[in-house]
Image (cartoon, helix red, strand yellow):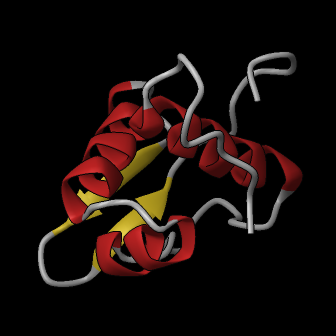
Amino acid sequence: MGEIDLDGPEPLFEQVAGVLRGRIAAGAYPVGRRIPSVRDIADEFRVSQTTAEAAVRVLRREGLTRATRGRGTFVIAVPPAGNA
């Protein structure tokens, strides 16, 4: 499991997005493949589905993922070096 600080000052959704971003950069979630579902992300990090959805939205805004209706959220780019 990625490390998030439930009592830290950084919002949980940003922490979760950071872990997912790092996994994309490391190739754990390669370009053209799905990331885990919002439910699976929520379960893994022990956060609400709302928090998990917000984390996935961050990745989408950054241009790293794209949602495909009925199929899931796919990696479309790797973060630039130093941004993982």
Q: Residue at x 43, y 26 (%)?
A: 11
Q: Residue at x 53, y 20 (%)?
A: 10
Question: Does residue 17 sit above or below 75 in this rendering?
Answer: above
Question: Does residue 78 sit above or below 3 in this rendering?
Answer: above
Q: Nearer the viewer, residue 84 or 4?
A: 4
Q: Quadrant of the N terminus?
A: bottom right
Question: Does residue 30 sit above or below 34 in this rendering?
Answer: above
- Residue 52 is left or right of residue 10, and the answer is left
Q: Position of residue 30 (x, y in %)?
A: 71, 64
Q: Residue at x 54, y 45 (%)?
A: 16
- Residue 54 is left or right of residue 33, and the answer is left
Q: Position of residue 61 (x, y in %)?
A: 33, 27
Q: Position of residue 54 (x, y in %)?
A: 27, 42
**Tally of marks:** 0
Q: Quadrant of the C terminus?
A: top right
Q: In terms of image quadrants, where is residue 2?
A: bottom right
